[in-house]
Amino acid sequence: MSVFIPSPTAFATVPSFSSPNFVSGYHIVPTGNTTMTVSAGCARALTNDFIIQYPSFSASLPSNITVDVSTVGLNGCYPVSIASLGLTYNQLFPVYVVTDTSGTYATGSTTANGPYVVVATGNNFLPAGMNSFCRIGWVWISESTSYILPMQQSGNGNEREYLLNAPITVLSGGTATTATEVDLTSTTGILPPNRNSKVNFNVQLTGTSTSSYVYLQPENFSASGATGTTILTPVASHALGVMVDMVVGTDSSTGDAAIKYLVDSGSAVTIQVAGFTDSIGNYLA
């Protein structure tokens, strides 16, 4: 899998439903090979009603939190370095804002107890002294360099959009004429599992006639016809490229995000993931 989903054993992860969960602000902006900034914001902690806010009460705080994924610790990766993981594929890692509920003090002060940001690189991603956390987004890391791969995050509240600088090819020249799954999570995929996410696809269809088609469906759909997204070629033997926004489904056996596709006989389709919508919600990741 190229999406890391932690499974903590050292601290509780049961969501609190005693108040509405939310994330406001905390926008992620890559700024260098290993650095990114996180803007001022506030969020309700996952497991309790504490509001994790930055900046706190100090007027001297910097406007953004700077995070360096080449380091291990607060405002870096935790609990281990990315280089130590020996990644096989480019991988998506969850990003959390963390704090100690005894108060929110200035980042960088000698008595600071939050808020900080950590990129989770292991199951027990909550550093010593921290007892509250909330996921605020994702960061995409290169398997060859351990660098941050460029993505743009936009949106507000719990719904955040990501656009990839280099779209990921999940199907190349597919010719299946019956509904066939395309996995969007494992190996080169970057869609978080167990979610019916909205995804932005680049689709290129090369047809054999003016009525050649490709059907795209959420994995959970059972029909084999035009029950999802339909793309038709207006000119025979020419490639048609379109951008498609659609909700994808979940593979019932693996939990991976997935779609089904089929084309008419003789046609071929290439599909790339260009971006996706992250619904933060009241979830660990």
Image (cartoon, rainbow, N blue to C red):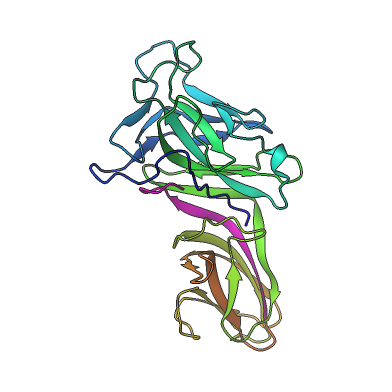
Q: Residue at x 48, y 49 (%)?
A: 161
The image shows residue 38 at horizontal and vertical percentages of: 50, 30
**What secondary structure characterizes most of the magenta part?**
strand
Residue 7 as seen in the image, left or right of residue 204: left
Q: Magenta part of the protein: which range?
A: 268-285
The image shows residue 203 at horizontal and vertical percentages of: 61, 68
**Residue furthest toward the front?**
10
> For residue 111, which quarter of the picture?
top left
**Residue furthest toward the right?**
144
| 271 relative to 154, above or below | below
The image shows residue 34 at horizontal and vertical percentages of: 66, 32
| 16 relative to 218, above or below | above
| 191 relative to 208, above or below | above
Residue 49 as seen in the image, left or right of residue 202: left
Tell me if residue 276 is in the magenta stretch: yes
Q: Residue at x 59, y 67 (%)?
A: 183
| 27 relative to 223, above or below | above
Question: Between residues 98 and 160, which one lies in front from this camera angle?
Answer: 98
> For residue 70, which quarter of the picture?
top right
Residue 132 as seen in the image, left or right of residue 137: left
**Residue furthest toward the bottom?**
265
Residue 272 in view: yes
- In what quadrant of the picture does the N terminus appear? bottom right
Question: Between residues 240 and 223, which one lies in front from this camera angle?
Answer: 223
Residue 146 in view: no
